[in-house]
Amino acid sequence: MMHPDTISALESGRASVHAVDEMLERVDRIRARRPSPSSRVIPEVDAMGRLTDLYIAPGTIAHSANSHELVADIMAAIRESTLDAMRQHELTIRETKLPEVPWSGE
């Protein structure tokens, strides 16, 4: 037979692990898609800041007069998508409520 405090601690630990697992699943589902200033490029960035996809409108590359402008357009969209993904990541973590633990002194 376990002591009631031990049982309570184990239950709190399981609840904490469950809450963190749910948070990590929400983080894994985050995808940010912010269009470039010209709207010709839309990258997809995950919550860890990784580029997971990149849409380039048909004809964009062929009709681009200046490769530096196209690169700047792509990079601007990736930066904006990354910032959005990071904001979503931070919000997901902030919104996660961990259960009260009996030994916290409260």
Image (cartoon, rainbow, N blue to C red):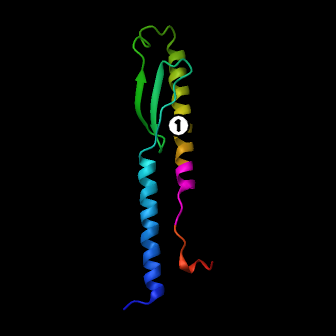
Q: Position of residue 16 (x, y in %)?
A: 47, 67
Q: Residue furthest left?
A: 1
Q: Which residue is drawn at 52% across and 29% down?
A: 34
- What segment is highlighted magenta in the picture? 91-98
Left or right, residue 64 beside residue 37: left
Q: Position of residue 75 (x, y in %)?
A: 52, 27
Q: Which of 34 and 71 is in front in this view?
A: 34
Q: Which quadrant: the N terminus?
A: bottom left
Badge 1 crowding class, 10 Å Cα cut-off, few under 14, some 14 to 19, many 20 or more, is many
Amino acid on which the number 1 mark rests in the picture: Thr
- Residue 59 occupies quadrant: top left
Q: Which of 11 and 87 is in front in this view?
A: 11
Q: Residue at x 53, y 23 (%)?
A: 36
Q: In this view, does 44 lie above or below 10?
A: above
Q: Residue at x 53, y 27 (%)?
A: 77
Q: Is residue 93 magenta?
A: yes
Q: Is residue 6 above or below residue 20?
A: below
Name the residue carrying label 1.
82
Q: Position of residue 63 (x, y in %)?
A: 45, 7
Q: Residue furthest right?
A: 106
Q: What element carries label 1?
A: helix
Q: Which residue is drawn at 44% across and 50% down?
A: 26
Q: Which quadrant: the C terminus?
A: bottom right
Q: How many labels does the image show?
A: 1
Is most of the magenta stretch helix, strand or loop? helix
Q: Is residue 16 magenta?
A: no
Q: Position of residue 44 (x, y in %)?
A: 44, 33
